[in-house]
């Protein structure tokens, strides 16, 4: 969409493997993570608990709120049940232009 100012972000949070899932969930409830997440300007798209890894969270975020999301994820305390000291926020690869056609995107080999 031409006027859409949102981006889709995937956040990977690796669990502290020394804690059980129940301990991690209790800690996140106690620290208000579930109450405050996602922060303003973000919309939860999907949330997966990946066995032996952690959370894989997809958010639709207003482009001008990405910095606020980053600050939220880096705040001390709430994410101490997560193993890494800094959560990973990854952006998806840009999609091909809707104007391109298969014949213009294919490479031919001689």
Image (cartoon, rainbow, N blue to C red):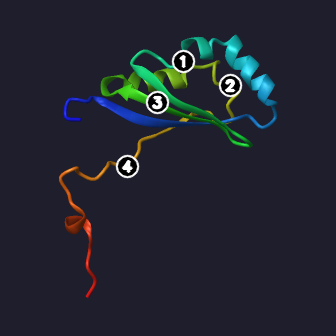
Callout 3: few (<14), some (14-19), or many (20+) C-alpha neighbours within 10 Å?
Answer: many
**Compared to 77, does 109 lie above or below?**
below
Upstream in the sequence, badge 3 or badge 1? 1
The residue wearing badge 4 is 93
Q: Residue at x 73, y 41 (%)?
A: 51
Q: Residue at x 42, y 15 (%)?
A: 40
Q: Residue at x 47, y 22 (%)?
A: 71
Q: Nearer the viewer, mark 3 or mark 2?
A: 3
The residue wearing badge 2 is 80
> Residue 65 location, x and y as percent?
36, 22
> Do the numbered discs 3 and 1 sit on residues whose CB atoms are within 8 Å?
no
The residue wearing badge 1 is 37
Q: Nearer the viewer, mark 2 or mark 1?
A: 1
Q: Secondary structure at mark 3?
A: strand
Q: Nearer the viewer, mark 4 or mark 2?
A: 4
Upstream in the sequence, badge 3 or badge 2? 3
> Do the numbered discs 3 and 2 sit on residues whose CB atoms are within 8 Å?
no
> Do the numbered discs 4 and 2 sit on residues whose CB atoms are within 8 Å?
no
The residue wearing badge 3 is 59
Question: Mark 1 and mark 4: span between their CA atoms?
Answer: 25 Å
Nearer to the camera, 2 or 89: 2
Q: Is residue 31 left or right of residue 66?
A: right
Question: Mark 4 and mark 2: span between their CA atoms?
Answer: 30 Å
**Compared to 98, does 81 lie above or below?**
above
Question: Mark 3 and mark 1: span between their CA atoms?
Answer: 11 Å
Q: Secondary structure at mark 4?
A: loop
> Residue 62 location, x and y as percent?
34, 25
Question: Mark 3 and mark 4: span between their CA atoms?
Answer: 15 Å
Upstream in the sequence, badge 2 or badge 1? 1
């Amino acid at each position: 969409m031409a006027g859409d100012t949102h981006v889709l972000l995937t956040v990977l949070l690796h669990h502290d493997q020394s804690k059980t899932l129940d301990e991690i969930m209790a800690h996140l409830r106690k620290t208000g993570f579930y109450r405050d997440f996602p922060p303003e300007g973000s919309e939860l798209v999907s949330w997966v608990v990946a066995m032996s890894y952690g959370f894989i969270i997809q958010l639709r975020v207003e482009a001008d709120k990405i910095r606020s999301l980053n600050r939220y994820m880096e705040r001390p305390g709430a994410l101490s049940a997560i193993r890494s000291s800094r959560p990973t926020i990854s952006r998806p690869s840009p999609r091909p232009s809707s104007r391109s056609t298969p014949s213009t995107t294919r490479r031919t080999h001689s």
